């Protein structure tokens, strides 16, 4: 059956204007004004979306889908993220990573990604993590041989445990080689903390080797003003930086995510060099003014919608505000049919109301959320 979404204000994420979107077999078939399907015998579901905005689904490039945490002991391990927890907040593509919790393995991460895919969204993973592990014996083989593996992560370069520049160069070279062999983007996701090293080892590898900067994706870059300043230098060199949504409320000196995006733009960093991710399933430590842990929460996909609204409220045009959540991570991950509304792309579509709230979510043309309520849930969700 065809799906025809009529009279919506389309952001692809670039602004198209009032248009109709035709969906066929989970793909966008056309985006035009006044599409009329009147062929005899063809069943078409028509939805009039006048007054609503149509955008690409969110591409969340950093989430602990199989659970994370563990930094405060076994009892602080966080659970797997439920399917509808992603969809109700607009995530239609997600990339799972391991965290510090050594009790979880890549097998569980891959199984969770395949579970999410069977339930209705697109899911990938990054191999390794810290300490370095793999499914096939090496990161290179994982990337080349396993469809869901897009790269390596989460590798710690500015916190404890710490990767040296030499170790980082070796892993980056292996990721680069796998990228060439597989045709994948070969992303190397780098965990940035408040350690003294900062971007030092990354800059050293870029200076001393021929590994292209596009393979490096530093995340959690807004924990401190100094770290954020270094991240802007990295982005000015052509690199992509990943801002973790919602961390501004946690660390005493952290820069709120929406503010960080605007500061990047004011500092001459192109919007195309910035992505935002949720860190779903990871522990979020909220500190008091003295630097002591006041409370601990779990990161959620809800921060993506919240930060998008904050960016628009700050005065940023919606078409520009959407890019770090949609087309930028899709391009960084090498996913040309994701993060955009265009003929041939997957029909991952969000419908937003006038207040920027998510009304409906389609993933590959299938309606998963309507009127803000999940219609489809995971097998064991209540």
Image (tube, helix red, strand yellow):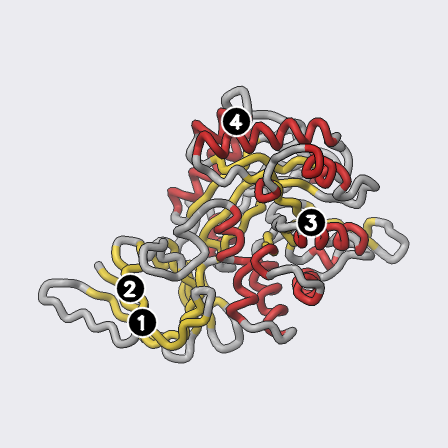
Circle 2 SS class: strand
Tag shown at residue 30: 2
Q: Which residue is mark 3?
A: 234
Instruction: Please say if the residues under marks 4 and 3 sit with CB atoms less than 8 Å apart.
Output: no
Q: Is residue 241 left or right of residue 357?
A: right
Front residue of this view, candidates 174 and 302: 174
- For the point 14% across and 63% down, which residue is it? 42
Instruction: Please say if the residues under marks 1 and 2 sit with CB atoms less than 8 Å apart.
Output: yes
- For the point 49% across and 27% down, which residue is it? 142
Observer-side mark, 4 or 3, equals 3
CA–CA distance in space, label 4 to label 3: 25 Å
> Could you tell me if residue 296 is visible in this image?
no
CA–CA distance in space, label 1 to label 2: 8 Å
Q: Earlier in the sequence, mark 2 or mark 4?
A: 2
- Label 2: how many Cα within 10 Å (few below 14, some 14–19, many 20+): some
CA–CA distance in space, label 2 to label 3: 38 Å
Q: Which residue is mark 4?
A: 140
278 is higher (above) or lower (below) than 51: above
Circle 3 SS class: helix
């Amino acid at each position: 059956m065809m799906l025809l979404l009529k009279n919506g204000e389309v952001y692809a994420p670039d602004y198209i204007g009032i248009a109709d979107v035709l969906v066929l077999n989970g793909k966008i078939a056309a985006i035009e004004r006044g599409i009329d399907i009147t062929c005899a015998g063809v069943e078409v579901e028509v939805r009039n979306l006048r007054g609503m905005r149509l955008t690409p689904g969110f591409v969340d490039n950093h989430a602990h889908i199989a659970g994370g945490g563990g930094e405060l002991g076994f009892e602080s391990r966080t659970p797997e993220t439920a399917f509808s927890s992603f969809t109700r907040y607009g995530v239609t593509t997600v990339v799972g990573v391991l965290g510090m919790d050594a009790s979880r393995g890549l097998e569980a991460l891959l199984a969770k990604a395949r579970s999410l895919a069977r339930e209705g969204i697109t899911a990938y993973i990054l191999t390794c993590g810290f300490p370095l592990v793999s499914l096939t014996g090496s990161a290179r083989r994982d990337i080349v041989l396993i469809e869901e593996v897009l790269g390596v992560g989460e590798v710690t370069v500015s916190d404890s445990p710490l990767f040296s520049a030499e170790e980082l160069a070796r892993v980056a070279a292996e990721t680069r080689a796998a990228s060439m062999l597989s045709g994948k983007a070969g992303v190397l996701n780098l965990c940035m903390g408040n350690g003294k090293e900062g971007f030092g080892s990354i800059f050293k590898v870029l200076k001393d080797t021929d590994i292209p900067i596009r393979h490096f994706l530093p995340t959690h870059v807004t924990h401190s003003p100094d770290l954020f300043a270094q991240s802007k230098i990295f982005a000015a060199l052509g690199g992509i930086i990943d801002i973790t949504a919602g961390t501004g409320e946690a660390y005493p000196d952290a820069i709120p995510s929406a503010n960080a995006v605007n500061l990047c733009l004011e500092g001459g960093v192109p919007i195309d060099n910035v992505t935002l991710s949720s860190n779903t399933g990871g522990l979020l430590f909220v500190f008091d003014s003295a630097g002591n842990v006041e409370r601990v929460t779990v990161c959620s996909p809800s921060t993506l919608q919240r930060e998008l609204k904050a960016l628009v409220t700050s005065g940023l045009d919606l078409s520009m505000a959407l890019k770090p959540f949609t087309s930028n991570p899709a391009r960084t991950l090498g996913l040309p049919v994701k993060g955009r509304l265009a003929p041939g792309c997957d029909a991952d579509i969000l419908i937003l109301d006038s207040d920027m709230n998510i009304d409906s979510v389609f993933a590959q043309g299938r309606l998963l959320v309507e009127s803000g309520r999940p219609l489809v849930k995971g097998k064991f969700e209540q």
